[in-house]
Amino acid sequence: MKQEGDNPVVQLQSLIGLHIQIATEDATSIIVFNDEWRHLSPEHLDAFLSLRRDYESGVRGIIQSGIDQGVLQPINASTILYTFLAALRWLHYRPRRIVAEKDPLELQKEMEILLLQGVML
């Protein structure tokens, strides 16, 4: 997930773009990730939860790196992480409507403003 040379803000911008792309191009995967995982069999549930923990840990690491570098507010990294992810979860509910009303790049810019300006120094 982390790319050499990228600063944490650029990495978070990329994650916002990726979430928007997936929500607009493959809403089913977002629905499974957000809602349907609860119905997985125990062995699949364990694998899913492990993958989700790894993803969240990677994003938390990006956020913590931004805090350590002084480019993000000194707020608990988990608070930022879960606020960030919760703000992106609504995208799967109406992706076709969003795409019809707004260009995905425009939506990404709006989400970057909403999600990043509050945590950037």
Image (tube, helix red, strand yellow):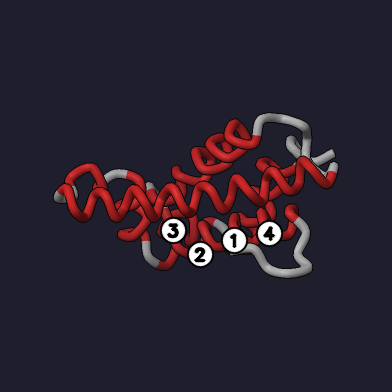
Spatial CA distance of label 4 from label 2 is 15 Å
Q: Nearer the viewer, residue 51 or 33?
A: 51
Q: Nearer the viewer, residue 72 or 54?
A: 54
Give the mark, 4 or 1, whose residue is nearer the N terminus.
Answer: 4
Q: Is residue 7 left or right of residue 62?
A: right
* Amino acid at pointer 2: Gln
Q: Is residue 26 above or below residue 75?
A: below
**Image coords of residue 2 (percent x, y):** 64, 63
Q: Amino acid at mark 4?
A: Gln
Residue 13, x across and y down, in percent: 67, 57
- Give the answer, above or below, for where 34 lies relative to 22: above
User: Residue under circle 1?
Assistant: 17
- Quarter occupied by the N terminus: bottom right
Question: Which tag, 3 or 1, sits closer to the chain's start?
Answer: 1
- The numbered mark, 4 or 2, whose residue comes first in the sequence reads 4
Q: Which residue matches tag 2?
A: 21
The residue pinned by badge 3 equals 23
Q: Which quadrant does the C terminus fall into? A: top right
Q: Secondary structure at mark 3?
A: helix
Cα–Cα span, label 2 and label 1: 6 Å
Q: What amino acid is found at the position of numbered circle 1 in the picture?
A: Gly
C-alpha span from label 4 to label 1:
10 Å
- Asked if marks 3 and 2 touch (Cβ < 8 Å), the reply is yes
Query: Which quadrant of the structure image shows residue 17?
Result: bottom right
Q: Amino acid at mark 3?
A: Ala
Q: Nearer the viewer, residue 101 or 18?
A: 18
CA neighbours of label 3 inside 10 A, class few (<14), some (14 to 19), many (20+):
many
Q: Is 110 left, or right, of 30 in this rendering? A: right
Query: In the picture shown, does residue 29 fall above or below 78?
Result: below
Residue at the disc numbered 4: 11
Q: CA distance from mark 3 to mark 4?
A: 18 Å
